């Protein structure tokens, strides 16, 4: 046995199957898809885990009952404080965040530390912040530097 014998192992390199390249190729004309039907078409063979042959799937046939809290949850745009401080030199409010391109208008904003729970946040300047929510670590960092944090009502959102 030599290196030459290992490299010439043809079973390790099977040729790619090129379908639909003429009748003489063995997989020509219909390309192994049969003649008509969904399986012969592009995007056919709809056989996902929930597909039941065109019958209404089980999860759609079952009644939907009970309470779901999904429609009543508070959804915030979470924004790390270090990104805000890098983008906005002065006071931080919703209009300044939209102008800097950090948030989408119309969705409430929550400021978080963004550096992990153990990391200490250093602002280095006195700022006035008005957002919908802020984490406890952000609040203490702002107030430690003499700044102020005002939490807005959810009804107050940035102008579109």
Image (spheres, helix red, strand yellow):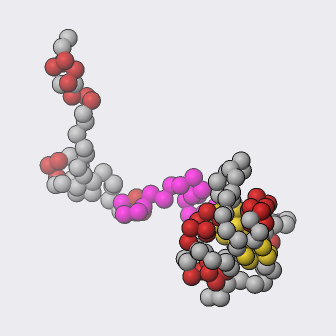
Q: Is residue 20 visible?
A: yes
Judge by depth and name the residue closer to the eye, 116 or 87.
Answer: 87
Judge by depth and name the residue closer to the eye, 74 or 122.
Answer: 122
Query: Which residues are drawn in magenta?
Result: 40-63
In this rendering, position of residue 44 left or right of residue 9: right
Identified at 53% across, 55% down, the residue is 48
Q: Quadrant of residue 99?
A: bottom right
In the rendered view, tell whether residue 115 sits above or below residue 133.
above
Residue, far bottom: 159
Image x and y of residue 93, in percent:
68, 79
Residue, far top: 1
The C terminus - image quarter: bottom right
In the rendered view, tell whether residue 32 sits above or below residue 85.
above
Judge by depth and name the residue closer to the eye, 81 or 121.
Answer: 121
Image x and y of residue 74, in percent:
77, 70
Identified at 59% across, 65% down, the residue is 83
């Amino acid at each position: 046995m030599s290196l030459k014998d290992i490299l010439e192992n043809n079973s390790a390199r099977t040729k790619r199957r090129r379908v639909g390249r003429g009748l003489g190729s063995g997989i020509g004309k219909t390309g192994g898809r049969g003649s008509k039907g969904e399986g012969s078409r592009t995007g056919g063979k709809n056989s996902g885990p929930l597909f039941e042959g065109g019958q209404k799937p089980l999860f759609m046939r079952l009644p939907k009952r009970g309470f779901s809290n999904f429609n009543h949850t508070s959804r915030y745009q979470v924004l790390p404080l270090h990104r805000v401080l890098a983008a906005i030199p002065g006071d931080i409010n919703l209009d300044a965040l939209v102008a800097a391109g950090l948030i989408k208008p119309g969705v409430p904003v929550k400021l978080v530390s963004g550096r992990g729970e153990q990391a200490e946040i250093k602002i280095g300047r006195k700022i006035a912040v008005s957002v919908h929510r802020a984490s406890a670590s952000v609040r203490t960092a702002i107030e430690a530097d003499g700044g102020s944090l005002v939490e807005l009502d959810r009804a107050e959102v940035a102008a579109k």
